[in-house]
Structure formats: structure tokens, C-alpha cells
Image: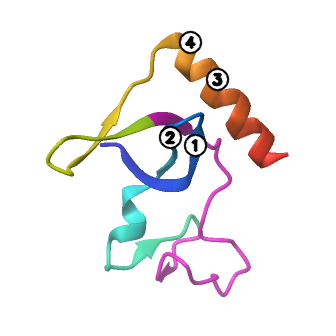
Amino acid sequence: MHCFVIESRFKVGSEDYAALLEVDPAIFDEEADSCECGHDHAFTDSCECGHDQEPEEDVHIILAKVVTDENGDINIEVPSDEDFEKARKVYEALEA
């Protein structure tokens, strides 16, 4: 299962885009998670043994076009290759 949150929204010309950050669905789980040391604690808590609960992982960002239809409903669309390149350049400039 993949879970994403909106990391940022930005414009490319007159079009809206969103940078979607992939997150571990466990962050929404209210039950305790197990640390690699074997202690049970909340996802954001630090373990008594000094281990950080959140493992260092690669960051996965998806750039998506945000389109509002005639009914006002918001849709997330995959941009064309050309639109993606434009959005990537704008996003990278925002991150710099």
C-alpha cells in the first residue's frame, strides 16, 4: 500500500501542481509500533535505548498536476512528460 501527503503546492504558469511525499502508512496507526530494539512505543517517541523510531529511508516525491473540474472537484493527474519537466524545474527551484 502506498500513502502520500502533500509536501507542497506550486504553480507552473497558470496550472497547479503538488509535490506528493510518500510516507509509511504506520504513521497514521494509533497503536504502538515496535522499535528495532524490541521496545514498544508510539511512532514519534524516542526509544529509551537511544534508537530513533523513524528509520532513515529514501525520500519519494511524486509531482502531480492538480486539476479542478467544472463541478469544483479536485483531481490529481499524471502530467505529460513535457509538463513534468517544467514542474520538476519549478519544484527544484523552490527547494534550492
Per the image, the residue denoted by label 2 is 17
Give the mark toward the camera: 1 or 2. Answer: 1
Tell me the residue that label 1 is attached to.
11
Q: Residue at position x 60%, y 70% from top?
A: 53
Could you tell me how far apart the alpha carbons at marks 1 and 2 are, in whole angstroms? 6 Å
Residue placed most toward the observer, 31 or 59: 59
| Residue segment shown in magenta | 37-64
Answer whether labels 3 and 4 touch (C-beta < 8 Å): yes
For the point 22% across and 40% down, the residue is 69
Q: Position of residue 94 (x, y in %)?
A: 75, 47
Q: Earlier in the sequence, mark 2 or mark 3?
A: 2
For label 1, the crowd category at 10 Å Cα-Cα, with few meaning under 14, some 14 to 19 and many 20 or more, is some
Inter-mark Cα distance, 1 to 3:
10 Å
Q: Which residue is mark 3?
A: 86
Label 3 residue SS: helix
Q: Nearer the viewer, residue 38 or 29?
A: 29
Q: Amino acid at mark 3?
A: Lys
* Picture quadrant where residue 61 is located: top right
Q: Is residue 82 above or below residue 23?
A: above
Tell me which amino acid carries mark 1: Lys
